[in-house]
Image: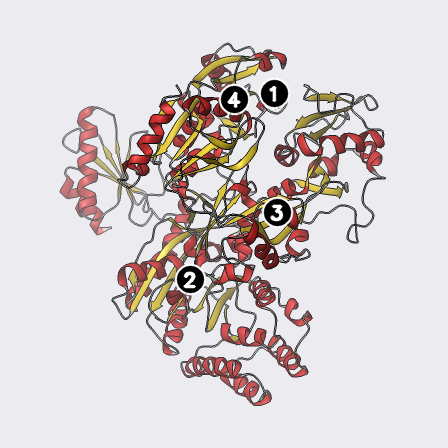
Amino acid sequence: MKNQKCKGMQDLLPEDMLRFRRIEDVFRTCCRSWGYQEVRTPTLEYLHLFTATGTLTPSMLSKVYSFLDWDGWSGERVVLRPDGTIPVARLYIDKLSGQELARLFYVTNIFAFEGTGKENRERWQCGAEFFGGAKSAPDVEIILLAEEIIRRLGISNVGLQLSHAGLVKALLKEFKLSPGEEAKMTNRILEGNWQALTKAKSATPEIDRLIAALLGLKGKSSSFLHNLKASFPKASQDFKSSLEDLINVTTLLDNLGCSYKIDIAAIHGFEYYTGVCFQFLAAGEKIGGGGRYDNLVPLMNGEDIPACGFALYVDPIMELLPLEKEKKGESGILVKGKELTPEIVKTCFAVAESLRDAGYPAELDFTGREESNYRWVVLVSGKEPSPFMLTDCVQGRQRDAASMAEILKVVSEG
Amino acid sequence: MKDYQAGYIKLALPKGRFLSPTASVLAEIDLGFQDYSDKTKQYRLRSAKFPGLSAKILQEKDISIQVAVGNYDLGICGSDWIEEFLVKYPAGALVKISSLNYGEGSIHVVASTQAGIANLDELSARGNDYRIVSEYPNLAEAFALNLRMRRFRIFPVWGAAEAYPPENADLAVLWGKSGADIATQGLIPLKRLLPVTAFLIANRESLENKDLSRILTCFSSKLTADLPACSPYDFGRRAEAWQAGPQTSIENGLDISEELKGTRPLWQAKEINLALPDGHQQAPTSQFLKRTGLALQGYSEEVVSRRPSADLDWLGIKVIRPQDMPLQVANSNFDLAITGEDWLLEHLYRFPSSPVKKLFALGFGAVKIVAAVSQEMPVADVDELRSVVQSSKLAPLKVASEYIDIADRYLRDNHINPYKLIPTWGASEAFLPEDADMLIDNVQTGKTLKQHKLKIIDVLFRSSACLIANKDSLASSDKKGEMEFLTQKLRAGL
């Protein structure tokens, strides 16, 4: 039995956890400092939460881990959480809907079957949701928050791409498809297949021109959108108002000195977005994304509350962070007994406790192995007048110590 | 494990509906097996023409799975069971080679004429919680998801799906010969999901690595030329055919329903609902009911009606599979049911807090639930089996059973580890010894097991027919009088 790990799952080893915690720590610190509060939702949710809202595409729904619970004779299926936002929206509706504004964040795992073996079936994300914030300043807030976290993590060459779900929907409307065909086309687009749209029979040459412009050009400022607006005066009202919305957000971003690229294709996977959408890319990988989803809370039988949010994908971000080793060398102290008599073992525990009380990490060793990678080693011999021998692993010096107080004094003087 | 050099090829052949047409096709292409007929008691067949070719007769439901897991290189089974597998496991190792162009009917999504559902758009628009009953739970789920149904529940059943709507289900996904045939059952076909034809299928790995050409050549005259362009191999993962297929939806649904309104009595809610078994249990149950003096029309050995009637105007009766009854009683679709203790236990192991209760055993349909292995396996009891599995000579132990939860519990309680369960749809003995090491199944006399060179190593429990009830119905003051009357009446037949 060499490999007993479940297919598609991953172990996080100590060096992975160092990077994981670093991401989490930066994320938590930033979110708190922006006034967001942490929540945690359960691993199991009802399947109907994700179908009822029409928020996951059928292809995503076909990959959820769903099953009947032990009391599931009624046929009500439960799922391993396939998405981070919907459970938080449920929590908001269930517990916090009295609050007009709620800024929430979470660190969570999500589950989706993945058959190619290229990705994990359990993935981690750090997400933040802003309930009750109407456009456009809240959109900018979440973009800037995500950007700050990524910056503080030290990831360089990160691209921000902006799109708008309303623009995409307005474009689709122009094709005058039947509701069934439109749903299929939406799915294809959300799965990243934009060719489907260019291949479809279009309504007018004007629309063809518009689609070609949107897919071919990548604007870098709100001016691009003003140009679009001026070039396509005949676009539908829906299209124009979505464009206006995107102009408002980009103008704010321009004023704040935040650079981005407008790419209508930068919308992926979720049906629940209604407004501005964005994603972050680094080294060719998507490392995060989000957007505005004003219809989600009402669709889930909540009140008419606008909302937006984002998630950062922990797994690809971990790949971008440098590996680090646990740095015991700086302050770590190893306490070991010369012999393992009950008296000496007791003293070892007492010494380690005093060191920890004084703020130093102290590890015990009862194996007698030679240890490096520590700042200090305290050898307990128990023999008076100097029952301790202190080794300075950095300077390579040894000295006897008569008491705990003496050890602490030497250690503190470095 | 696979021996490519030796050139052994294993073929899985269907029982039931496709047995005779498959046998004739095989005879026609000179690939006949002597004992492949309706009368055979054999599961294992050898080819006279190809010494390296062996075949096994399996339930169609099992064939797609068995070919996918690689126990068989090739198989023949209906497109419905292939798609039922592929829609859930699109990346599985099952490859459709070609339709063999026989088979009839289609898988349809149907509603009752009395449900007031005229087309599919209404289904996705309404926020209702739809109950969908089907022998094809994966196809049913894919259908509901693709239609963006807001809320739905799938009830997998062993059979008799047509009996459920409208009281016990809103929709059924089932086989029907034609729209008209479905209409005679009081149902409206809303959408045709796929036509049912026999397919030649293969295991991907076998097809990629093993020389199957001698056998495939035999089929060459049968491989359809008029399949959609490109290669004869349909490597399509997902069943595009049925998703994008001709949408013969609604098939004059409204007209049918109008016609039927005149001819069929409208279903009326009854105060107490009783489920009676079909299949093997029908004859003894019918005899038992005669002794109780309960006069029933449409439930004798000769007549098979899904809705027999009784001389009690408050009693509704339906005939369904005994395997499906505990779940149906738990869901209050029925207050009382006659089923087997084995199926009640299977249900309670799966759903420990289910509100289903056994009232009393009825004294017929006695079977033993046993664990059996090949006579050649050197173990006499479960303790010896445990040591063999622990020594990893036989790890994981492959266990075939139609009682998945009973088998699971038995193996866990006996600390057999590791093991793998192979769900079957009856006739688990066909799986031993090649495709499973042990079976957990019911036996009456044990004769069949002996015939197949198997031996019983443990008796799990004894089971017979019993009356089960929904606990809430028993406690309900509205139903109390009728429930007591009926149980007394049934008790009188003991």
Which disc number belongs to residue B182? 3
Image spot of residue A172 (x, y percent): 58, 73
Q: Confirm or deny contact between disc 4 and disc 3 (CB under 8 A).
A: no
Check disc 4: other Cα within 10 Å, few if <14, some if 14-19, many if 20+: many
Which disc number belongs to residue A311? 2
Q: Is residue B464 above or below residue A207?
A: above
Q: Secondary structure at mark 4?
A: strand
Q: Report which residue position mark 1 lands on.
A: B432
Q: At 54% across and 69% down in the image, what residue appears?
A: A266
Q: Secondary structure at mark 3?
A: helix
Give the Cα separation between the discs numbered 3 and 1: 39 Å
Q: At 49% across and 63% down in the image, what residue appears?
A: B125
Q: Earlier in the sequence, mark 1 or mark 4?
A: 1
Residue B37 appears left or right of B189 = right
Q: Confirm or deny contact between disc 1 and disc 4 (CB under 8 A).
A: no
Image spot of residue B362 (x, y percent): 41, 21
> Which chain is mark 3 on?
B
> Which chain is mark 1 on?
B
Task: Select label 2 or label 1 by which is in front.
Answer: 1
Q: Does residue B135 appear anywhere in the picture?
A: yes
Colour style of the rendered protein structure: secondary structure
Q: At 70% across and 30% down in the image, what residue appears?
A: B12
User: Mark 2 is on which residue type?
Assistant: Ala
Give the Cα separation between the discs numbered 2 and 4: 50 Å
**Quarter-wise, where is residue A235 in the image?**
bottom right
User: Mark 4 is on which residue type?
Assistant: Asp
